[in-house]
């Protein structure tokens, strides 16, 4: 059921983004809305796909192992109360700073787009509260094997967003009216995501009522790991923020719509393969680490890393091959033109080179964190930010919007290799995560899948893009399945068994 909700969420997300592109086109209003969405979406990813799983879940697992369920419940209630205070303070300070920035800019015509972006950011910032609480409420459910309610949350958000796009506008209303309607729908969706978690937490036996007060030793220990965990997982997320800002600054106020849509297209394989694998593995890694089983932890990391690399390389190669017809089918209508398609295809292909590194880096960060080493991923993520800024400054003027994708792919690859090296040099795991002799069998199925899909499109010539997708995708999948079965029989059998269990 979890995979079904995740897949449903991603498919609805594609429908949502197709409607957005058709409704707005590549315009300053779309660019401002996409950039305003970056900050609350950053918190969603860092909390929901990162720090809660990396810091809160292990802390709850350790508390339960050492003090029983009562100790774990008390820690969760304390963390709940602390997070509520921090989130409301964060939103209050953020609103004041954004409002002050708008006032400083005044009514100068040169700052119209910046003022619009700041206003949209002020409207969307409160979304941080329900979405971060949703992520926190997912942690105890995950520890009890409950994943479907957290996976349902994004479905509800997308349904609200799509409803806002499909509901007819009043006569004479323009892009600005639609943008505010969408932002209202996002806030409603955030509350719904939070509300749907409450029965799951209650049903798992965890307390719903937050506890306020001075931090006790367990809470202080959890908080000591929470911020480094947040920073350690921030490289990929901050890269998306940097891309949006730099493209908007170096190209024009509407150009970041391309990076937004390219990142959205990237999220189907990243969520279904990378995030889903890491989310499911984190409770397992947390328990092995809490038990001090380093050998078991190493085996668990490798058992996730190898199929993760196998699948993400195939996804990247396949999506690279079908990028043009996919963008044409999904977005090229109404205000989204063929010229926009050409820019988006080039941008997407640049990002795809970093997809395997993004997924693998997420697992490697959690391997460090499960071992109790939170500082190393945080330092590496901190080093990636200036590298990303410099890469964008060099590549965007040269390559245009696609330069942002190449910059992010470079940053994610460097981060992944650095994390791999540190796992060995710090002796966190007794054996390597990936062996060089296994790389050809992990990479070749993906390359064959992409090549087969590209060949199918070439043979079809100028066929309609929908027909091209209908033919090329199954051809690529068959090529991948045949090569994976032949070269990685054990991984293929494990994947089929996992799919049968989920079915």
Image (cartoon, helix red, strand yellow):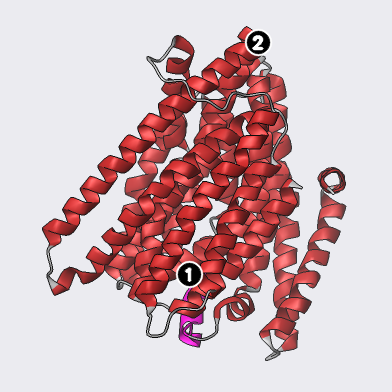
x, y percentage for residue 286?
63, 24
Disc 2 from disc 1: Cα separation: 51 Å
Front one among 103 and 411: 103
User: Residue 451's image quarter?
Assistant: bottom right
Crowd rating for badge 1 (residues with CA inside 10 Å; few <14, some 14–19, many 20+):
many
Left or right of residue 277, residue 129 in this image: left
Residue farthest top in this picture = 67
x, y percentage for residue 430?
65, 22
Left or right of residue 101, residue 315 in this image: right
Query: In the rendered view, would you say 325 is above or below 417?
Result: below
Q: Which residue lies at the image location 24% right of the left edge and 65% below the top edge?
A: 114
Nearer to us of marks 2 and 1 is 2
Residue 401 seen in this snapshot: no
Secondary structure, mark 2, is helix
Residue 26 seen in this snapshot: yes
Crowd rating for badge 2 (residues with CA inside 10 Å; few <14, some 14–19, many 20+):
few
Q: Which residue lies at the image location 44% right of the left edge and 35% below the top edge?
A: 230
Tell me the number on the disc at residue 63: none
x, y percentage for residue 46?
48, 42
Q: Main secondary structure of the magenta part?
A: helix
Instruction: Indicate whether residue 342 is drawn in magenta.
Output: yes
Residue with the mark numbered 2: 68
x, y percentage for residue 14?
60, 67
Q: Which residue lies at the image location 50% right of the left edge and 50% below the top edge?
A: 190
Front one among 355 and 498: 498
User: Residue 315's image quarter?
Assistant: bottom right
Magenta highlight range? 335-350
Secondary structure, mark 1, is helix
């Amino acid at each position: 059921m979890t995979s079904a909700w995740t897949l449903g969420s991603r498919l609805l997300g594609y429908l949502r983004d197709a409607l957005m592109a058709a409704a707005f086109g590549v315009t300053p209003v779309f660019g401002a809305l996409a950039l305003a969405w970056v900050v609350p979406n950053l918190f969603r990813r860092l909390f929901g796909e990162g720090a809660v799983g990396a810091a809160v879940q292990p802390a709850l697992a350790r508390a339960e192992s050492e003090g029983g369920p009562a100790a774990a419940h008390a820690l969760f209630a304390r963390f709940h109360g602390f997070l509520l205070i921090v989130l409301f303070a964060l939103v209050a300070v953020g609103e004041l700073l954004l409002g002050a920035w708008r006032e400083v800019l005044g009514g100068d015509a040169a700052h119209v787009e910046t003022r619009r972006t700041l206003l949209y950011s002020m409207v969307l910032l409160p979304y941080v509260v329900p979405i971060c609480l949703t992520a926190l409420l997912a942690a105890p459910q995950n520890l009890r094997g409950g994943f479907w309610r957290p996976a349902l949350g994004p479905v509800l958000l997308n349904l609200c967003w799509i409803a806002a796009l499909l509901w007819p506008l009043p006569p004479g209303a323009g892009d600005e009216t639609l943008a505010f309607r969408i932002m209202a729908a996002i806030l409603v969706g955030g509350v719904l995501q939070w509300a749907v978690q409450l029965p799951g937490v209650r049903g798992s036996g965890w307390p719903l009522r937050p506890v306020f007060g001075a931090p006790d030793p367990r809470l202080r220990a959890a908080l000591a790991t929470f911020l480094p965990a947040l920073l350690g997982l921030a490289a990929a997320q901050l890269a998306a923020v940097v891309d949006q800002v730099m493209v908007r600054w170096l190209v024009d106020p509407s150009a970041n719509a391309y990076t937004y849509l390219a990142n959205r297209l990237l999220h189907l394989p990243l969520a279904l393969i990378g995030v889903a694998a890491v989310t499911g593995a984190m409770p397992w890694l947390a328990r092995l680490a809490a038990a001090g089983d380093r050998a078991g932890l190493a085996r668990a990391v490798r058992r996730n890393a190898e199929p993760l690399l196998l699948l993400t390389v195939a996804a990247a190669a396949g999506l690279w091959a079908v990028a043009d017809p996919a963008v044409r089918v999904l977005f090229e209508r109404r205000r989204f033109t063929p010229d926009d398609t050409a820019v988006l295809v080039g941008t997407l292909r640049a990002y795809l080179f970093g997809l395997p590194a993004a997924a693998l880096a997420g697992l490697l960060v959690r391997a460090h964190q499960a071992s109790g080493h939170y500082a190393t991923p945080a330092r590496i993520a901190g080093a990636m930010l200036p590298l990303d800024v410099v890469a964008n400054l060099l590549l965007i003027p040269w390559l245009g919007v696609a330069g942002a994708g190449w910059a992010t792919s470079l940053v994610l690859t460097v981060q992944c290799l650095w994390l791999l090296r540190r796992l060995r040099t710090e002796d966190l795991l007794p054996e390597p995560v990936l062996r060089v002799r296994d790389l050809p069998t992990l990479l070749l199925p993906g390359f064959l899948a992409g090549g087969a899909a590209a060949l199918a499109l070439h043979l079809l010539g100028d066929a309609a893009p929908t027909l091209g997708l209908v033919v090329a995708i199954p051809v690529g999948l068959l090529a991948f399945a045949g090569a994976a079965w032949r070269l990685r029989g054990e991984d293929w059998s494990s994947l089929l068994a996992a799919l049968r269990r989920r079915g």
